[in-house]
Amino acid sequence: MADSLAPEGKSGASGPMVSIIVPVFNTAEYLDECLGSIIAQTLRDIEIICVDDGSTDDSPAKLATWAAKDSRIRVLRQENHGGGAARNTGMDAATGEWLFFCDSDDACEPEMLEEMVRTGDGTDSQVVVAPRALWDEALRIIVSTTRFSQRIVSSAMPFPARALGADIFVFSGNTAWNKLFRRTFALKFGIRFQESRRSNDLSFVNCALALSDRISVCDKALYKYRSGRVGGAVYSAEDNPSSLFEAFGCLRSELASRRLFDNFATAFAKALFISSGYQMCRFRSAKSVAFCHARLRETLLELRRLCDLSDGDVLNEFQKENYRVLLESEDPIPFLLACWRSATRRASDLSLRVDNLRLAWMDEVQKRKDAIASFRADREKAVADFQLEREKMASSFRAEREKVISSFRAEREKVVSSFRAEREKTISSFRAEREILLAKLRDAQTRLTAIERDCHELENALSREKANSAQIEKSLSWRMTSPFRRAACFFERFWR
């Protein structure tokens, strides 16, 4: 309740940026690819609400496994009531600022949500619409990519629903999975999915577009829609051919209850005519074709009081012819033939356009070949000029290098010669000094030898003197009376 009273544009700071709602019913084969692409989104601030609509295959087990891997995944379970009821259950549990609905057999490019949220927040939009890439399950390739018209892409963003006029319900398809809805916007107007088995998002999507006065487009095909799957919407539409008319009836009631139907009657009639005609041409049952033709003709005749699709440029020339045949005949065969003729004429026109494009492409290819040849010639000339200049610079460099080397060698020889002369001079001086010192050393040694000899001679003389003194003392010992002894002792001390 608090969310419904929040100002439009913000859904509360506590919630994630985007709530991704994935209705699941017996798509276990594709769940890994689907959920893997969602958790790989570069925008990390998301919650993933998977609503198991009573699956009887391995989908519940796979959902439990993925929920255990990533805490952002929540799994809700309900009895089988269809995709519309599952989306409503997920929307009731959502807390994000934006709502995104992803079919469980489709996949998203990693940057999809980041690009769409950047576009929506940058323009303060209520609805963001993006093109899609069509994956063919049988061929296992992307067979087509939708693009918006230049008029839409070049429009100032955001634009109101009335800016597209009769194209508002056909420019982006009647699907929820290529759109981003601001949650407070959906809550404010109480927009809900039709709880039916088929075409349950038609009313929700087109009612949201009609109510919005701030729509933006993100011109990047980042959603991969799987087509041709057995059990998918295209295969199951023929089982209940009235489902499309019930969905358009629900949309008409929603618009009428909001007093908007008269404003969008032409857009409603155009969307019904194109969608029903496309579906009718794909039916293989005559009964289904007859039913759709009768309902479509009845509805468009009833709407002629409000709008006539043949007026102005609401329809192109092929669609106008088909519309005229539809109203004129109660038999579906003329209408189908008119559709076939239109398709053939469009194919012829497309073939002519393809031929013109092929010729233009061939001219462009030739121009590019000429440009490449010119570029190669210029490149060869530039390479030759560069090589010549490089040789000149190399020659100049080699000459300069030889000059520098010669100068260096001459300077080195000069320094070496000077060093050698100085070294010889130093050695000669050292040798002369050494000879002088050696001579002095020899002289000192000679003198030392003489001194040692003199000392030896003195020692010998001293020894002789001591011997003489001993003899004298012995000879005079008899004379050692008191006076004579004292004199002898005196002389002995003196001599010593």
Image (tube, rainbow, N blue to C red):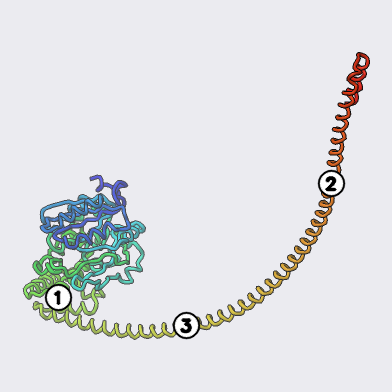
Q: Amino acid at mark 2?
A: Ala
Foreground: disc 3 or disc 1 = 3
Separation (CA) of disc 3 from disc 1: 54 Å
Mark 2: give few (<14), some (14-19) or many (20+) Cα within 10 Å.
Answer: few
Q: Quadrant of the C terminus?
A: top right
Q: Which residue is more in the foreground, 199 or 307?
A: 199
Residue 194 visible, this angle:
no
**Image coordinates for residue 454, horizontal then vertical, percent:** 87, 40
Q: Residue at x 81, y 52 (%)?
A: 438
Q: Residue at x 25, y 71 (%)?
A: 142
- Whether residue 385 sits left or right of residue 413 in the image: it is left
Counting residues from the N terminus, which is met first, the one under dot 3 or under dot 2?
3
Foreground: disc 3 or disc 2 = 2
Counting residues from the N terminus, which is met first, the one under dot 2 or under dot 1?
1
| Mark drawn on residue 281 | 1
| Mark drawn on residue 444 | 2
**Image coordinates for residue 316, horizontal then vertical, percent:** 24, 77
**Mark 3 — residue?**
376
Asked which quadrant contains residue 52, the reply is bottom left
**Image coordinates for residue 113, horizontal then vertical, percent:** 30, 59
Tag 1's secondary structure?
helix
Q: Is 382 drawn above or below residue 154 in the view shown?
A: below
